[in-house]
Image: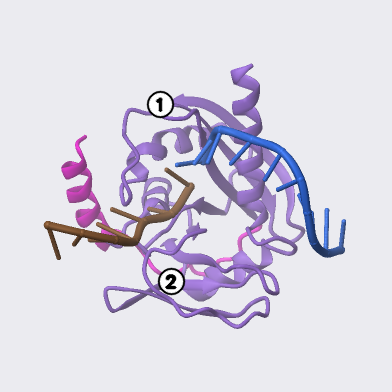
Chain colours: A purple, B brown, C blue
DNA sequence: GCGACAG
DNA sequence: ATCTTGTCGC
């Protein structure tokens, strides 16, 4: 798979994203996905962390070592992380109702970021959450829950969401089988006390810790 | 041509 | 992402 092949696949896949939730969507368990790298080598550790949406407590997790050959190219994340993330998901004992990715969904140059790719690949409703915007936005009000549109190429592709009073916003977008209002609500519910949702925090902590342990 | 550029 | 000390705040 070359970068050009990847870009062509994204353009071809973007129309397949379903920007609305399944009928009666009421997710109970959300899984956060993240990867930690060993510098520029291809070695990595992927983690999936299941959190109970009602309590934001960790209820299951899986950590798997891996390797990637695809380089870091902005816009082509999935081709670097997707295989390992899917193995971490498969290693879970729990079947999550929702996935929360470390990276954008449709807030992407070709409207097909990592979260869209993960969503289509698994069929599970997926939300993209990024720490840095891809596009432009005006700062939301300082109160938790405030948000402003994230715009790219003249289109609203997501939201800059303040998850805690006074903290920098995070950037939420549709991955697959969810709408932006539902995604915003879920991310806020998953972020009761920190800037990032507990799903992301747990996954990040797990793969980072496992990576350090594997080095020594 | 130049800058910007998710993790 | 990762490399890194001290420092501010709960």
SS category of the residue bearing label 1: loop
SS category of the residue bearing label 2: strand
Could you say which quadrant of the image residue A95 lies in?
Answer: top right
- What residue did someone put label 1 on? A42
For this view, does A11 lie left or right of residue A213? left
User: Is the C terminus of chain A in the top left, top right, bottom left or bottom right quadrant?
Assistant: top right
Give the percent coordinates (x, y) of residue A78: 36, 44
Instruction: Give the farthest residue toward the top.
Output: A216
User: Is the N terminus of chain A in the top left, top right, bottom left or bottom right quadrant?
Assistant: top left
Q: Image height check: is A35 above or below A39?
A: below
For this view, does A10 lie left or right of residue A206? left
The reply to whether dot 1 and dot 2 touch (C-beta < 8 Å) is: no
Looking at the image, which is closer to me, A53 or A140?
A: A140
Looking at the image, which is closer to me, A82 or A42?
A: A42
Q: Which residues are magenta?
A: A1-28
For this view, does C9 lie left or right of residue A41? right
Could you say which quadrant of the image residue A184 lies in?
Answer: bottom right
Of all chains, the one bearing label 2 is: A
Asked if one can make out residue A177 in the rendered structure from this viewpoint, the answer is no
A45 inside magenta stretch: no
Give the percent coordinates (x, y) of residue A150: 42, 74
Of all chains, the one bearing label 1 is: A
- What residue did someone put label 2 on? A158
Looking at the image, which is closer to me, C5 or A204?
A: C5
Q: Residue at x 73, y 56 (%)?
A: A56
Give the percent coordinates (x, y) of residue A207: 60, 34
Give the percent coordinates (x, y) of residue A36: 53, 35
The first of marks 1 and 2 along the sequence is: 1
Tally of marks: 2
């Amino acid at each position: 798979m070359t970068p050009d092949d990847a870009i062509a696949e994204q353009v071809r896949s973007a129309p397949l994203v379903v920007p609305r939730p399944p009928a009666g969507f009421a997710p109970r368990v959300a899984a956060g996905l993240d990867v930690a790298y060993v510098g520029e080598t291809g070695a990595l550790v992927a983690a999936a962390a299941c959190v109970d949406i009602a309590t934001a407590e960790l209820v299951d997790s899986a950590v798997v070592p891996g390797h990637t050959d695809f380089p870091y190219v902005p816009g082509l994340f999935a081709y670097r992380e997707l295989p390992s993330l899917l193995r971490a998901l498969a290693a879970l004992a729990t079947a999550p109702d929702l996935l929360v990715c470390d990276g954008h969904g449709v807030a992407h140059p070709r409207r097909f970021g990592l979260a869209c790719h993960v969503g289509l690949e698994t069929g599970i409703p997926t939300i993209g959450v990024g720490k840095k915007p891809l596009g432009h936005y005006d700062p939301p009000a300082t109160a938790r829950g405030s948000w402003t549109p994230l715009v790219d190429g003249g289109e609203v592709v997501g939201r800059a969401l303040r998850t805690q009073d006074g903290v920098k916003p995070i950037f939420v977008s549709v991955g697959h089988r969810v709408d932006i209002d539902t995604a915003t609500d879920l991310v806020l519910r998953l972020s009761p006390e920190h800037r990032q949702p507990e799903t992301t925090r747990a996954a990040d902590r797990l793969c980072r810790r496992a990576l350090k342990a594997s080095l020594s």
